[in-house]
């Protein structure tokens, strides 16, 4: 079993190691009484030598933690907000697409049965109307 010396435990207490090393040492601490003793001695030494720094560090760590958690929380909330906006936009797009598709589907069917315009007389065929219009146009052209 690999053991850690006082110096390493000092680094561990002051959190001067990588998160992997810290968790590794933490697990070792649960299984090894020898290292636990060293760790306790280190802790005692640390609190005796640097009591002010210890509290300062703790306060600082707490402040950082609170700030980080606060940032994370606000980030989380804004993510939820952005997700909500995105979801709403997607729903609108889907709805628009759906209605667009629906209107396209109804379009040709509506064109097949057009409502007759009010000025158009049903008894008079369209060919006659076109002929009359053409003749009227020719008349006006000749009169000019
Ligand atoms: Zn050990």
Image (tube, rainbow, N blue to C red):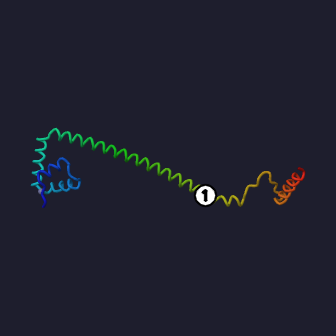
In the rendered image of this protein, does residue 137 appear above or below residue 71? below
Single out the residue that lies furthest toward the front.
Answer: 144
Which x, y percent locates residue 62?
25, 42
Single out the residue that lies furthest toward the top.
Answer: 52
For this rendering, which residue is in front, 83 or 112? 83
Which x, y percent locates residue 101?
59, 58
Q: Looking at the rendering, in which quadrant would you find the N terminus?
A: bottom left
Instruction: Identify the residue shown where x is 67% and y is 60%.
Output: 108
Q: On the image, numbered disc 1 is attached to which residue?
A: 102
In the rendered image of this protein, does residue 14 appear above or below residue 30? above
Q: Is mark 1 on a helix, strand or loop?
A: helix
Instruction: Identify the residue shown where x is 84% and y is 55%.
Output: 133
Q: Quadrant of ligand 1?
A: bottom left
Q: Quadrant of residue 99?
A: bottom right
Which x, y percent locates residue 87?
47, 52
Single out the residue that lies furthest toward the right.
Answer: 143
Q: In this view, does 103 lie to the left or right of 143?
A: left
Instruction: Identify the residue shown where x is 19% and y is 39%.
Output: 55
Which x, y percent locates residue 21?
20, 55
Q: Is residue 120 left or right of residue 55?
A: right
- Count of numbered badges drawn on the protein: 1
Q: How crowded is mark 1: few (under 14 residues within 10 Å), some or many (20 or more)?
A: few
Mark 1 CB within 8 Å of ligand 1: no
For this rendering, which residue is in front, 36 or 133? 133
């Amino acid at each position: 079993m690999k053991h850690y010396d006082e110096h390493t435990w000092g680094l561990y207490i002051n959190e001067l190691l990588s998160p992997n090393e810290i968790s590794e040492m933490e697990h070792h601490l649960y299984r090894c009484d020898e290292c636990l003793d060293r760790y306790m001695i280190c802790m005692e030494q640390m609190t005796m030598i640097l009591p002010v720094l210890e509290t300062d560090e703790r306060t600082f760590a707490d402040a950082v933690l609170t700030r980080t958690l606060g940032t994370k929380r606000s980030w989380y909330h804004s993510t939820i907000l952005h997700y909500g906006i995105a979801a709403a936009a997607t729903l609108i797009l889907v709805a628009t697409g759906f209605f667009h598709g629906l209107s396209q589907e109804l379009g040709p069917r509506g064109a097949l049965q057009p409502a007759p315009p009010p000025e158009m007389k049903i008894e008079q065929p369209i060919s006659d109307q076109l002929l009359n219009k053409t003749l009227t146009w020719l008349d006006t052209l000749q009169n000019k």
